[in-house]
Image (spheres, grey):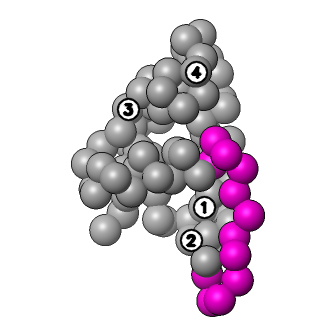
């Protein structure tokens, strides 16, 4: 919820955000998100996670809530 309104996340967006929040500021590897949430092993050139992260930032109206570190790691910006 944001400002009393429910934010509609897709299942994958929700699971990605949940994983990043659970790590409480620690880095989460892109590979981990691809394997554990998307169930996809051919991730070398796939932009799926990048798209989900972009959508999460937009829905939360906060582009700085999730930091991207060298296109391979993500973490909550505390």
Q: Dot 4: few (<14), some (14–19), or many (≥20) neighbours within 10 Å? A: few
Location of residue 73 (image quadrant): top left
Left or right placement of residue 34 versus residue 9 in this view: left
Q: Is residue 69 above or below residue 45?
A: below
- Residue where numbered disc 3 is placed: 29
Residue for point 50% across, 21% down: 35
- Mark on residue 57? 1
In space, the residues marked 1 and 3 are separated at their CA atoms by 18 Å
Q: Quadrant of the C terminus?
A: bottom left
In space, the residues marked 4 and 3 are separated at their CA atoms by 14 Å
Q: Nearer the viewer, mark 1 or mark 4?
A: 4
Q: Nearer the viewer, mark 4 or mark 2?
A: 4
Callouts 4 and 2 close, C-beta under 8 Å: no
- Mark on residue 62? 2
Question: Residue 26 location in percent, x, y?
Answer: 25, 48
Element on which disc 4 rests: loop
In space, the residues marked 1 and 4 are separated at their CA atoms by 22 Å
Element on which disc 3 rests: strand
Q: Nearer the viewer, mark 4 or mark 3?
A: 4
Q: Which residues are magenta?
A: 2-13
N-term-proximal mark, 1 vs 2 = 1
Q: Is residue 18 visible?
A: yes
Question: Residue 52 location in percent, x, y?
Answer: 65, 45
Location of residue 40 (image quadrant): top right
């Amino acid at each position: 919820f944001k400002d009393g309104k429910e934010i509609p996340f897709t299942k994958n967006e929700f699971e990605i955000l949940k994983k990043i929040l659970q790590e409480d500021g620690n880095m989460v590897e892109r590979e981990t998100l691809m394997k554990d949430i998307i169930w996809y092993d051919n991730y070398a050139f796939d932009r799926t996670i990048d798209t989900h992260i972009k959508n999460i930032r937009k829905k939360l109206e906060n582009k700085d809530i999730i930091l991207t570190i060298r296109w391979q790691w993500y973490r909550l910006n505390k």
